Image: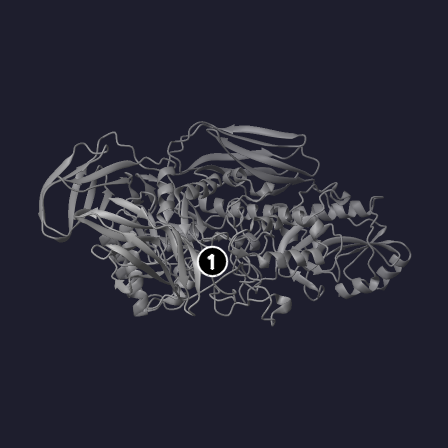
Amino acid sequence: MEYLSLEEEWEAQLADGSVYPMQVPGSLDESRIGGRDMGANQWHPDADLGNAENSFDPDAPIATRYTRKHTYEGEAKISRMISYIPEEEKRVFLEVERARCLKLEIDGKEIPDYVEPSISTPHIFEVTDVLDGEHRITLRSDNSYPGLPHDAIVFSSAATDETQTNWNGLLGYVRLRTEREVFFSAVRVYPKENTIDVQLVIDGSIPYKGILRVTSPALEKTEEKEIEISAGVHTIALEGLKLKENVKKWDEEEGNLYDLTASLQDGDEKSVTFGVRDFGDDGHGHLALNGRRIFLRSEANCCEFPETGHPPMTVGEWDKILRLYHSYGVNCMRFHSHIPPEAAFTAADQMGMLMQPELSHWNPKNAFEGDDSYEYYQRELKQTILWLANHPSFVMLTFGNELWTGELGHQRMDAMVELAHSLDTTRMYANGSNPHYGTIGCDAKSDFYTSQKYYEYDLRGTFAAMPGDDGIQGYINNQYPSAAVNYDNSMKHLRETYQKPVFSFEVGQFEILPDFGELEEFHGISDPANLRIIQEKAEKLGLIDNWNAYVEATGEISRIGYREEVEAVMRTEDMSGISLLGLQDFPGQGTALVGMINSHMQSKPYDFAKPERFASFFRAQLPLAALPKYTYVSGEILEAEVRIANYGKTDMTGPVGYCMEGGKVRKCGELPAVICPAGGITSAGKIEISLEDIDEAVRLDLTVEQDGVKNQYPVWIYPAAKPVCPGKVYETKKLDEKAVQILENGGSVYLAPDSEKEHLPSSIQAQFTSDFWSVGTFAAQEGGMGQLIDEKHPIFKNFPTEFHTNWRWWPMASQRAVIFPHPVKAIVTEMDSYAYMRPMAQLAEFRCGGGKLLFSSMGLQNLQQYPESRALLHAIYQYMDSEAFAPEEEISVEEMSELVK
């Protein structure tokens, strides 16, 4: 087998007859071919494209995603002249590693496909006896997908302009390959428990008789077989080839690989690389790798590569990407409605990363019901399974993202699962990721279930606010915080109908305000107009000088939310893992910047985005303290059951140590030694810590440790003080005549209306976390992004705090935030979505009407059941009774009267 690269400058002719020079491999975009991006192929057809302030201006920039500098949809004829004389008794093939719909013409004559084509697998044409001198090669590349399910493809991550772009071109290798007259067109290795099966596909233009030989360092002996075959394509199966006893298994973080060579006596030889591993259901409804239960720590990759508009095609590039994800704790990559190039699987094989590709399919209406859809996706499924057969990293596959369909579609899904099993039993398959959003339960034919819900039972902690909802849904924003929530009840109901592995889907989606520093990274095919619009708005509103603090605060809140989501699943013994969305920013769908990593695959330059901070809880082994709450009153006893989640490769042993410390406090102890076997969760005893002698407000950190593995929880302790308003402060729910009179006389007023819309007409309902995904996608949410706190303000002398929301702010953060008519310097700012950037606050002080005014929209008087709310109110009273209460910013009585009713 020999190769001749065809990489050089070709020419591209578009449908209008225009001709351009084009670099191959590459896309039209990369060669600057195409017209203006007018916003086609939105993630849904009625997405609002324009700048909100210029939504009726056809020249307005696209505000919801990156803009392609050049775009083209349709057939492009990519051609060049070639001079080629083949060797005698050799067969010749033209191969393109990745393209859209592709046809080959040589001197105007169409050449049939050698293998069934798909947009996710290599395109191969046999050109034996066609190339024999000077010829014009024309590759007709069409990204309008004639005869294929166009919408299902262009809404998927394989072709959407929201991320990858619907590029047109030729990627990866573009080459001629020469073979003998009888050659191995495929060698596929399927590992079993102590053996391997080898499938050999031999293609001969002439008959063959001789010895077939298979050798590998992993095999006990060389396998030989005498064969006699006629001309044509033949499949030969060698089953039960025994492995050596000391063969090394492929595993997480262990890229143990072996070569296998198939040869024909006096003929062809082909070598492949494979790994020995067993992946599947352990028989009790849990994912297992090599017989060991694992905890899936998955991340959704939506094919965001803004410099090229398409995925990288080299192993080196993918090695760098996967190692970045691994540094955050990821052990499995889910490829959201796309199949990455083979280089990604090769890199994953070498480092021990699990991979879950999906068909290029996102159809939320009638998946597989069209004959074109069913025919195409069967082909893509088959070719993908055969193409990736030798990659041990390829462990799971689904038929697309969030598919909905009817009875016919489900019948066809069932048939496709059966097809997949008939082709390869060493992988697991499911009819979709989050099919029907979990509303119809689990599919009996599928090997696993990944979803956000099982009917009405949640499998994650946060959901978007939909029309009619009262804010963001899910327990994280609607249930007083603890470190004890799990999904045992959901799994109990699910197990009534389904006994196979279950893991959650697209967990997180906590938005972070944009890091404008990334604007300096754009040099390729994308124009980040949507980010510039946000930057310009921030500059106009005077927010830019403090913007990094906004980014940092929303990032910290996001990380806190992600940690709770992860640990809730780890506390659920019957779940096999969690799949995030996501660690990387998503530049489309309204601009969903949810990541620790930017769209250029760079960790954001902030403390919250450091990989080690995320990996501290996103890991295989983790002590879990089931704290019933995070805030306590002096004199209480902190009690928490400790469990050790151990999904590593070895048992964890020894005593469980704990230490709670901060300031002048240090309280440590040890639970008896316990063996925590790999592959599950083990109870380790109960922590009991007296808080009797803590007499001041303090944050403590509780560290729990076994066998060198640590986890740390924040705990806040407050004295048992009852807040009493000072005599010199007038507390009122509205700016009444008495309040105005006191202000006119130079007095102090604490304005604290009930935190309700009728009393705060210019306000939003805030929540603990930042908003979900983006308001551009889920417009029913009000846009609050959490609190930015002036932690050095003297009001917090007796209520020490961070600069961002944390668990002890939960009751207050969940109240309303007032929208001021102009920017104000607040003590507690409610940050706003990039889409609005309204000046909002929950706590602020002013000079007003000749006096001093402290305003709270948090309704603390109605939150006195919470120790943190009592403590904050007590701190407010102490501050207002001190000389430190000296507001600098001015607001008129009339302005405040409009804000509070």
Q: Residue at x 34, y 43 (%)?
A: 393
In the rendered view, tell whether residue 159 sits above or below residue 291: below
The front one of 685 and 790 is 790
Specify the quadrant that holds the C terminus: bottom right
Residue 9 as seen in the image, left or right of residue 375: right
Q: Position of residue 572 (x, y in %)?
A: 43, 46
In the rendered view, tell whether residue 11 sits above or below residue 287: below
The front one of 492 and 232 is 232
Residue 871 as seen in the image, left or right of residue 134: right
Label 1 crowd bin: few (<14), some (14–19), many (20+), radius 10 Å = many
Specify the quadrant that holds the N terminus: top left
The front one of 191 and 339 is 339
Q: Is residue 351 visible?
A: yes
Q: Position of residue 658 (x, y in %)?
A: 54, 31
Q: Report which quarter residue 80 is drawn in.
A: bottom left
Residue 766 as seen in the image, left or right of residue 706: right
Q: Residue at x 61, y 59 (%)?
A: 783
In the rendered view, tell whether residue 622 sits above or below residue 439: above
Residue type pointed to by label 1: Asp
Q: Label 1, on which residue? A: 29
The front one of 33 and 469 is 33
Q: Position of residue 831 (x, y in %)?
A: 66, 54
Instruction: Describe the colour scheme in one phrase.
Output: one colour
Q: Is residue 440 visible?
A: no
- Image mark count: 1
Q: Position of residue 520 (x, y in %)?
A: 59, 49
The residue furthest right is 745
| Element carrying mark 1 | loop
